[in-house]
Image: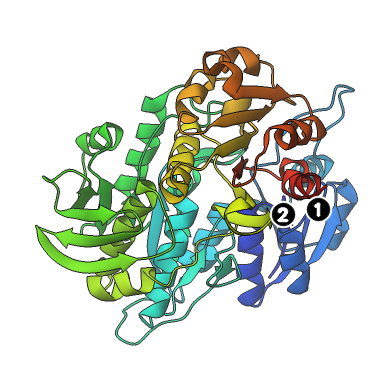
Amino acid sequence: MHIHILGICGTFMGGLAALAREAGHRVTGCDTGVYPPMSDQLRALGIELIEGYRADQLQLKPDMFVVGNVVSRATTPEGTPRYPLMEAILESGLPYTSGPQWLSDHVLQAPEQARHVLAVAGTHGKTTTTAMLSWVLDQAGLTPGFLIGGVPLNFGVSARLGALAAGQARPLFVIEADEYDTAFFDKRSKFVHYRPRTAILNNLEFDHADIFPDLAAIERQFHHLVRTVPGSGRLVVNADQASLQRVLGMGYWSELAGFGLDSQVGWQVRGAPHDFEVLHQGQVKGHVQWALGGVHNQLNALATVIAADHVGVAVADACQALSRFENVKRRMEVRGQVGTGAQAITVYDDFAHHPTAIRTTVDGLRRQVGQARILAVFEPRSNTMKLGAMKSQLPWSLEQADLAFCHTAGLDWDAAQALASMGARASTAPDVDALVAQVKAAAQPGDHVLCMSNGGFGGVHAKLLQALKA
């Protein structure tokens, strides 16, 4: 079929486009400000990209319009539709569906070859854990398909279909299972469409304040996911999270594999985040030694091992594969250094944007660099952070940083006031150039400059490296 994707440059929709193209469908798409890296990946696949959402795209006459959740019925201040193509689709009575629904119907649960879906859900760590699990299964010779909300360095692509491996009843497919809503016409969480047989529930905190009123509302959505896992399936659940225990308290019908740092759970880790053992029922089953840091990545690895075990990968083999894991772009990615040796200033890029993710990211870097100074440069860019729902947690999230620099563009709340308890350790700036100037003035030889955002951050990484060299 020919599908036309609205909002094609988002990580999920771009991955879906790549899968559809690999499956032999004709794919076109549109977005506003068609942007890399997804635009580069899609053009390399021969997918035609159109700038904007003009109604004349009806002339493409696709068999199906696939609508991303960026699209809405919103209007401009002048009263005209922000997405005229969507209005034209509705007026014309043409067929449309959501991205998750199309993926389920034509890939995950396709009548000719349904897949064993391994879904990775959680407030934090979804992308990294999905990449880890895909890599472990790949190294075990199971040729999994995957759809990841980022580009794993081990694969270089964010999505592929995979194939049926010897000894498997179904092809395996690993997917990042997002709790954000599906589309403007389907307010269920995306992950409800995936019907996994193996589901990781990594952690659960309040997020997405633009669509969820409170944590309990997200817990209900997670329980909707639990309801879709069959009896022969496995729930891999972080036992240290009270929120996830409340989800399980609503009922579950599958094998439960609890993991965490607590000695009472079946699966545990022992050792430092960069060099640790995996234990099951008190017995050492494997050993991971890798370049990643942070307790959060230890737990991501543990969840990965348990999920891989469910489809027949030995724990020791999974641990060996993890020792060769290279992480995902924009996860503590070194963007450059100014200077040499111990005097070098290192600039990092990380996707962290929720306060807990910021805290664990800074903590992971602190464990890596010891007493060296950390300069945390961040922008509260997610819808939740823009609303100010978690501004009070920012000082806590930045405790391990020596200095903090906040980009305040687009905020309706006073970031300086929110960071006031940090005193002279915190600074704010209304634009990226001012932010770069502040960091340059404060930076010293041997510093580690950690930039955190879930967006492009105005090219701050390159601007910082250029300024620090001057």
Question: Mark 2 — residue?
Answer: 9
User: Where's residue 1, x and y in %?
Assistant: 68, 70
User: Which residue is more in the foreground, 292 or 201?
Assistant: 292
Q: Nearer the viewer, residue 422 or 25?
A: 422
Viewer can see residue 255: no
Cβ atoms under marks 2 and 1 closer than 8 Å: yes
Marks 2 and 1 sit apart, C-alpha to C-alpha, by 6 Å
Residue 426 x/y as whole percent: 61, 23
Give the residue number, with chain letter if any, for mark 1: 34
Answer with left or right where residue 469 lies relative to residue 192.
right
Against 311, residue 188 (above or below) is: above
The picture quadrant where one finds residue 111 is: bottom left
Q: So how many labels did they put on this image?
A: 2
Relative to residue 62, is residue 162 depicted above or below?
below
The amino acid type, in three-letter code, at marker 1 is Val
Residue type at the position of mark 2? Cys
Structural crowding at the residue carrying mark 1, measured as other residues with C-alpha within 10 Å and reported as few (<14), some (14–19) or many (≥20): some
